[in-house]
Image (tube, rainbow, N blue to C red):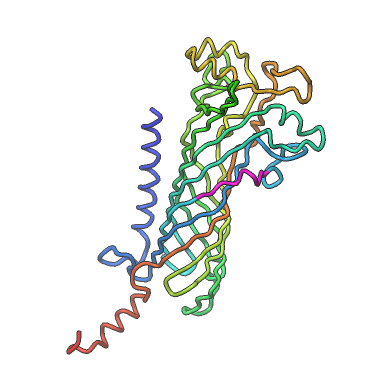
Amino acid sequence: MKQFIRNCACKLLLTFSLSTLLHIPSFSQHFGFQTGKVQWEAGVNFGPTFFLGDLGGNAGYGTKFIKDVNLELTKMMKGVFITAYPNRWLGIRVAGQYTYVEGRDNIINTYGVNELWRKQRNLDFKSDIWEVYGAFEIYPTMMFGKYEDYNPTFKPYGFIGVGIFHFDPKGSLVNTNGTKSWYRLEPLHTEGQGFAVYPDKKPYSLTQMNIPMGLGVRTRISERITISPELLYRKTFTDYIDDVSTTYIDPNYFDVYLTPENAAIARQISDKTVGIVTPGVNRYEPGTMRGNSKNMDAYFSFVLKLGIKLGDLRDADERRAIRQTRCPFYY
């Protein structure tokens, strides 16, 4: 069922993106890299990615956005994109990319008491993230340009769109020999998701929608090459990218709802408390806060986009004028 939903979602996004591009005004009798005044650009993008979720953070109370970014867990994102420019102030982008995110409680600095319970929680996760999205780019300075040939080197822009991403969190356990092993967390139902005794805790899907948005500056290096530094933020609608959201459950229910093998792993990986706040206490009571479900998980990247304009760089009027002035002997 999950595979069916994922395939339908991807087809829906692909259909929407292609329909948008194919119905851009100014298209002529055939479809090409450039028809009329539509310009096309394709390229690659890469840059550091940062995760914003329940795990990890810094001293003090956990908060939103930059305050709790752990720079030591910075990961790299890489991807490809293609953008159509039907006019001077609008771009329509389709992109696909891969990144990786991670969070750990044991790296939190304990300068006071407000962060101790998070460090004592002692959870960790890592996950690959694959995503595809479509977005509209708006170039405000180009909307008010007085002349048709106005083409500055630097063009600031903002963008927003819709996307689909796939994640699959894993958590670690260390055996008596010190060897660390990683286990997929979604099948372990670590917070009782889908258990009949916890009807308010629903299973989460590993494929979700997000809202990519951000700001950038498109910089013209030559008539064909552009470089664009960009901030790309993804708003998500799930709090389970790191598999942490609500409360601890009674571990005895793992034996009721899971296979013996998964139940044994879930017991250990769902509650890895260490006695920092209360020495000698290494398990939380059922119902104790495990995560903050009020804030959805998010991730953002600082991206460098390298684009190459495709097709003939001259517009239709210029090409028509050239054809009309060609010498028949040579052409």
> Foreground residue, 26 or 293?
293
As drawn, is 203 to the left or to the right of 246? Answer: left
Single out the residue that lies furthest toward the right: 112
As drawn, is 173 to the left or to the right of 59? Answer: left
The residue at the point 40 percent across, 36 percent down is 6
Q: Give the magenta-colored segment's residue range.
A: 69-77
The image shows residue 310, relative to residue 146, as above or below, that is: above
* Number of numbered tags placed on the structure image: 0
Percent position of residue 14, x then y:
37, 47
Percent position of residue 211, x then y:
53, 46
Task: Answer whether residue 81 is magenta in the image.
Answer: no
Quadrant for the N terminus in the image: top left
Single out the residue that lies furthest toward the front: 177
Percent position of residue 198, x then y:
58, 17
The residue at the point 52 percent across, 10 percent down is 256
The residue at the point 36 percent across, 76 percent down is 314
Quadrant for the C terminus in the image: bottom left
The image shows residue 315, relative to residue 258, as above or below, that is: below
The image shows residue 28, relative to residue 247, as above or below, that is: below
> Foreground residue, 97 or 262?
262
Percent position of residue 199, x then y:
56, 18
Image quadrant where residue 12 sits: top left
Image quadrant where residue 296 sits: top right
